[in-house]
Amino acid sequence: MTKRPEKQAARDVLAQLTTAGDRATLEVGSHELPVTSLDKPLWPGAGRRKGATKRDLLIYLTRVAPHLLPHLADRPIFVTRFPDGVAGKSFFQKHWEPAPRFARTVRIHSSQNDRDGDYLICENLATLLWLGQMAGLELHAWFSRVNPEPDATGRSRKFTGSEAALDRSILNYPDFIVFDLDPYVYSGKEGHGEEPELHRRAFVRTRGLALRIREILDGLGLASFIKTSGRTGLHLYLPIVRDLDFDAARGVAETLARHVQRERPKDVTVEWSVRRRTGKIFFDYNQNSRGKSLAVPYSPRRHAAATVSMPITWDELATVYPTDFTLHTAPGRLDEHGDAWAGMLDAKQDLAETLGAGSAP
């Protein structure tokens, strides 16, 4: 497990960020981190909507790090960078050559490039703040880990050389099956070609679908966890013992997706065509693939309200709305209530035993 940042180190960083000018060199424990453009707006405010600067982002990351870092432990990550803020252009970054000395990397074969590359594993506050300094606003982590403990000690840890080696490795066995619910229900205010904006009518429908999925899983004796995506939808996670590979996990997700589609054909779609999704909730089971990911818990999102992806309890789902959780409000919630997903890896379920669907060892 990743060591949580020392409380004193975090307090020291917060004090430095509060008093620093537009640029500074932060002392983060035993590491030094130059930061620049601290007063640059990354989420522009408008009217009653409060904006957020890079300074606000770094303060946020420091405050939530004790809760966020455990969800990144031992997982290759990639980020979406927004050099000019959420109103500007963005790009994905997966490979880091070179990374700073305080950052951990792991070498993994890339099927797309047919070569090995360095992937980042974010396991300390200095690395998290370095990503923030580079305007890495959205954080994404693999659903699999490089650490075989405690439930996959017999799996290979060789990730380089070929796709076949990666197929045999522990990185091909996820900790979760994920259910990504993305409403393609338009408010009518979107511009031509724009994706659906967040609005209550669509979110209420998505909430209803999430509750139905939970009901099905409960009926199978399977406990699930839920979070807001930070944008328009919801993410459900089913923690599993690592005896299913990604192909098997995706098969389980597809079976459930098609079941609820048959139940609710007017509400649910698994279609990739945007035209055929319109007016329905897209149940994306294909996220269950090696190297794919959703925004991690507490990741900031590209939304005008500076929202974050927030783990919640099932009891809260009836009353919450995605814009309840922002860079400005999420730290206070965590201070008061803690992480709703704490200990999720201790709640793993043997899906192969429950459903009789295993993959070859």
Image: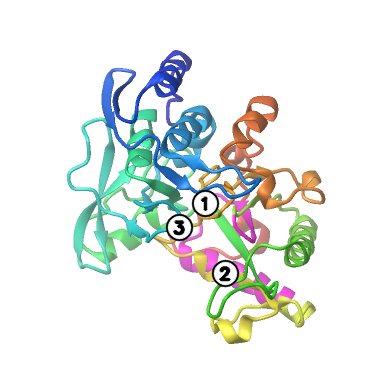
* Quarter placement of the N terminus: top left
Q: Can you identify the residue that label 2 sits on?
A: 285
Whether residue 342 is visible, yes or no, is no
List the residue tagged with mark 3.
87
Q: Which residue is mark 1?
A: 301
Mark 1 nearby-residue class (10 Å; few <14, some 14–19, many ≥20):
many
Q: Residue furthest top?
A: 8
In the rendered image, which quarter is residue 173 located in?
A: bottom left
Q: Are marks 2 and 3 in contact (CB under 8 Å)?
A: no
Looking at the image, which is closer to me, 256 or 308?
308
Is residue 63 rendered to the left or right of residue 203? left
Quadrant holding the C terminus:
bottom left
| Res. 258 image quadrant | bottom right
**Disc 2 versus disc 1: nearer the observer:** 1
The answer to whether residue 215 of the structure is visible from this angle is yes
Amino acid residing under circle 2: Tyr
| Above or below: residue 352 compared with residue 1 | below
User: Eyeballing the image, is 304 above or below 112?
Assistant: above
Residue 323 on the magenta span: no
Q: Which residues are magenta?
A: 231-260
> Tag 1 or tag 2, which sits nearer the N-term?
2
- Under circle 2, the secondary element is helix
Name the residue rendered at 35%, 58% in the picture: 92
For the residue marked with disc 1, what is the amino acid?
Arg
Percent coordinates x, y for residue 246 in the rendering: 47, 63
Q: Is residue 70 above or below residue 87?
A: above
